[in-house]
Amino acid sequence: MSAEPARREDAPESGGEPRRGILIGEAEAERPVRVSVEGEELVWHPGESLVATLMAQYFGRRGRGAFMGCREGGCGACKLELLEGVVAMRPNYSKDVLEDEERESGRFLACRARPITDISVRFVPRRNVFFELYGRRLREKERAAVGEGSGTQPEEVSHG
Ligand code: FES
């Protein structure tokens, strides 16, 4: 495991902690932190990758199994946009799926990232696996709210 310390990409605002920043390197919060995804609140626990938190807590066990992303920084399926907070992202990812310019604009790969502070994120607005699953979960919640759903279990998602 790399021991490269995280370095700050965004300068702190007026001497304090930055409101939004993507650090490069190995770092994570030492306590559970809140993760707001499209307005829904999750909890990340130390030792987890952010993609594991999203899949386990947001989509449930069945949804986690359905996620077909590489989980190694090579496919871009887990790309998120950071709205608030600070994350650290391991440097071993493909620049083909996350260019420096894109990262500097606030996008990062959840499978390579760990939060440093409470964070707020949203899915990158293009078709990807997270976005598909998120949409399915929203539709299930809407059906359940109007009494048409058969429960809260997420749907199985098949790819390919
Ligand atoms: S799951 Fe492939 S880049 Fe994150």
Image: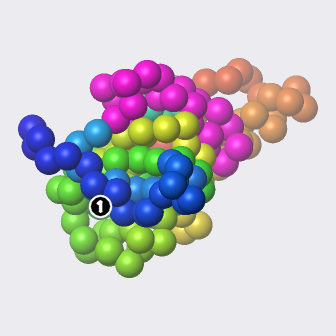
Percent x, y for residue 40?
A: 68, 37
Quadrant of the rendered image containing residue 101: bottom left
Q: Which residues are magenta?
A: 28-50
Q: Tell me the residue at 29%/39% (across/down).
A: 27
Percent x, y for residue 18?
A: 51, 54
Position of 100 relative to 51 (above/below): below
Identify the secondary structure beneath mark 1: loop
Q: Which residue is mark 1?
A: 75
Evaluate whether residue 146 shows in this view.
yes
Residue density around tag 1, few if under 14, some if 14–19, many if 20 or more, within 10 Å: some
Residue 74 among magenta residues: no
Quadrant of the rendered image containing residue 59: top right
Q: Name the residue nearer the viewer: 142 or 21.
A: 21
How many labels, in total?
1
Percent x, y for residue 51?
A: 40, 40
Position of 65 relative to 78 (above/below): above
Evaluate whether residue 127 shows in this view.
no
Name the side, left or right, on which 83 lies relative to 91: right
The residue lying furthest to the right in this view is 146
Q: Name the residue nearer the viewer: 75 or 112.
A: 112
Percent x, y for residue 139?
A: 73, 43
For the C terminus, the quadrant is bottom left
Query: What amino acid type should be assigned to the residue bearing mark 1?
Result: Cys
Position of 3 relative to 144 (above/below): below
The residue lying furthest to the bottom in this view is 101
Report if the beta carbon of the residue with label 1 is closer than 8 angstroms to ligand 1. Answer: yes
Q: Tell me the residue at 37%/40% (across/down).
A: 114
For the N terminus, the quadrant is top left
Q: Tell me the residue at 42%/39% (across/down).
A: 116
Name the side, left or right, on which 136 lies relative to 71: right
